[in-house]
Amino acid sequence: MLQLGDGLTCFSAVFLLVLFGTRSAVWSTALTASLYLFVVLFRFPQVPVSRAKQVLRPGSRLAPGGVSVVAHRGGGHDAPENTIAAIRAASANGATGVELDLEFTADGIPILMHDETVDRTTNGSGPLSILGFSEISQLDAAAKHRLSDRFQGEKVPTLQEAVEECIKHQLTIYFDVKVFPVFQLLLLLYNSSVVCSFEPKVIYRMRQADPEVVTALTHRPWSLSRFGDGSPRYTSAWKHLWMQVLDVLLDWAHHHLLWNLCGVSAFLLQKNYISTDIVQYWAERGVEVVAWTVNTAVEKDYYQQLLNINYITDSLTEDCEPHY
């Protein structure tokens, strides 16, 4: 299989620009045929439905209605995010699984951390790219948490420590991966895992490394331009407009091309963009929709009882503001 991951999004964007920019029926037909051939030759088939269901909706610990409740960053409202304490709290509060963020220290140790710096969540400062594990292991991961007194001294865990804790509590892990990692051995050790990413190339490379791994694309419309979401990402009107165009192309690519090329089993979608039609659209393609981040009782009832889909939440015990 060729290393095509880096060009997936660019390929789909260029294809659409050329396709919609030409008036020639011959060129449009040729481009459409080439895209179809590309997908047929290089796509990964979805993992068997039975395996995907075993991971996405395991037989034990399911909420009423048979859905999985997944603790976002381990449940960052109930305990310091991405810590062993959060995993234990999520299990105690009835979670089916935990969503965890994977990053690497300067000396290549995989750890749980959402940001590229340690500033927001710990009593330290600086980017991970210059901090070794020996330095990070001295930090208090609860320093900035609302319950810091209760969890004082909580450490930043390694990936292996987190996986072992999840195995102990029989929790499914949703790994949020930003760059292609080398942790296939841990996936073999713990096969009730979902690899999730906003980056299609990460999912594609993960399927190359292990075609049996269950994967999910994460998507939030208008993520490039932040259209309709407060202040624009760019001050330049032209750049903002161009990002909006790319947002439209990326949305199309996720829904019609990239999911199929990567053979994903789930589609993690920001909660405000989920409807019965969206759930039905993906169900017809054998893909489960997972909503994020669902933090109020009313929302939880809606996704659990009416839509009957899995959801990711910051808290299993109370209403709270979401962390994106």
Image: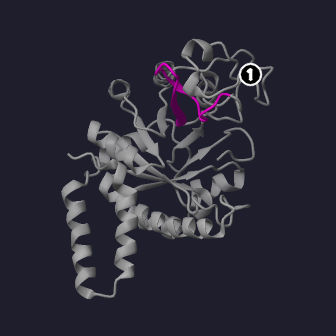
Residue 138 location in percent, x, y?
Answer: 65, 12
Q: The magenta stretch spans which residues?
A: 97-118
Q: Is residue 111 magenta?
A: yes
Quadrant of residue 99 within the rendered picture? top right
Tell me what residue is drawn at x 45 percent, y 23 percent. 167
SS for callout 1: loop
Front position in the image: 238 or 295: 238
Q: Tell me the kind of residue under disc 1.
A: Asn
Residue 35 located left or right of residue 136: left
Mark 1, residue position: 123
Residue 223 location in percent, x, y?
Answer: 58, 58
Front position in the image: 27 or 29: 27
Tell me what residue is drawn at x 27 percent, y 41 percent. 208
Q: How is the image coloured?
A: one colour
Would you say residue 11 is visible in this rendering? Answer: yes
Residue 160 location in percent, x, y?
Answer: 46, 20
Front position in the image: 145 or 20: 20
Residue 71 located left or right of residue 193: right
169 up-or-down from 53: above or below: above
66 up-or-down from 18: above or below: above
Quadrant assignment for the N terminus: top left
Tell me what residue is drawn at x 66 percent, y 60 percent. 234
159 up-or-down from 46: above or below: above
Residue 302 location in percent, x, y?
Answer: 63, 59
129 up-or-down from 208: above or below: above
